[in-house]
Image: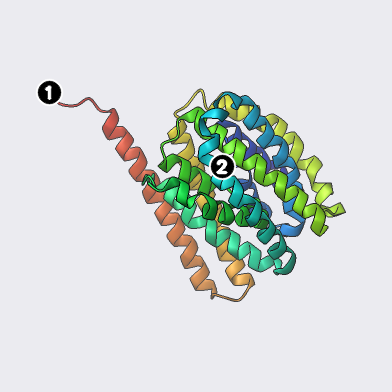
Amino acid sequence: MDVVVLVLISFVAATVNGALGYGFSSITVPVALLFYTNKILNPALVLVELVINAYVLFINRKSIPNVFRRVAPILIGLAMGVGVGSYLLFLVQPAWIKLITYSFLLPLILLQAAGIRKPIRAEKAIGVPFGVGLGTLYSLTTISGPPLALLFNNQGYPKQDFRAALGIIRLTESSLTAIAYGFIGFYSAGSMEIIPYIVPSVIIGIPLGTFLIRLMDPETFRRICMAFDGLVVGFGLSRVLGELDLASPFTTYSILSIVIAINGYLLFRFFRDRSVLGQPQPP
């Protein structure tokens, strides 16, 4: 059962990644953590993401000169953050890492689903600390898409520059994390065994996503993906709170219900606003 779910969710995640340029880990991890620990899952995903991120950067290579100076401070912080996160992954109990993963992801996903846009003026000043936090998060969870997408969407990156900036940062963080995991000794038979189940989904899903995004509105596709991701993360958070005995069953179900309600409202508001904008204006 766990292998079937891993194949299906990695296929869905790869399709989203092909369409948006990010989303593979942020969709795969919340579901896969229901069956695997981070210490088994992370090394496998990092190696797979090395290839995905290199591909994303290659097809958007013409935009690299446009964004490299803007993302350079983030790259500096990444190196420090990856070291911190990898060491924490070595020390911390898996269930607590799941809690950190879900707790950090949920507000970021809901902010994206809400379409929040607040450009940051001091972009250079936040680069290094943002990179440290991003590197720590990625090496702990292999997830960085939601905070990156939130930042770059806020800063108004054009589509190709957005993808190139994502490619640069994500290839750097996956490369550094792969090296750090090697030094710590995270690569195990369990991690290597699940890679063959992920790779075919990636090979099929990424080109499919690239094709599908041409047939529909990208923003609509992104909002639907965020809504799905929010539900998955809300469910995972509810489960791990119960697993750690941090909340009663009533509280955990209440959290999931609140997430479902917020997701439903945000989707309703998005489609309502789109339909209003699409209506002809009165003379």
- The number of callouts visible is 2
Q: Could you tell me the amino acid type at mark 1? A: Pro
Q: Quadrant of residue 262?
A: bottom left
Left or right position of 242 against 4: left
Q: Is residue 265 above or below residue 62?
A: below
At x 74%, y 64%, the residue is 90
Q: Residue 121 appears at what percent x and percent y?
A: 37, 46
From this viewpoint, is residue 4 visible?
no
Q: Nearer the viewer, residue 216 or 21?
A: 21
Question: What label sits on residue 283 in the rendered view?
Answer: 1
The quadrant of the picture occupied by the C terminus is: top left
Per the image, label 2 sits on a secondary structure element best described as helix
Q: Is residue 46 above or below residue 283?
A: below
Distance (Cα) linking label 1 and label 2: 50 Å
Q: Which residue is mark 2?
A: 72
Whichever of labels 1 and 2 marks the residue nearer the N terminus, that label is: 2
Badge 1 vs badge 2, beta-carbon distance below 8 Å:
no
Q: Could you tell me the amino acid type at mark 2? A: Ala
Q: Residues within 10 Å of mark 2 (few under 14, many from 20)?
A: some
Per the image, label 1 sits on a secondary structure element best described as loop
At x 47%, y 52%, the residue is 126
From this viewpoint, is residue 140 visible?
yes
Q: Residue 73 appears at what percent x and percent y?
A: 55, 46
Q: Residue 159 appears at what percent x and percent y?
A: 48, 30
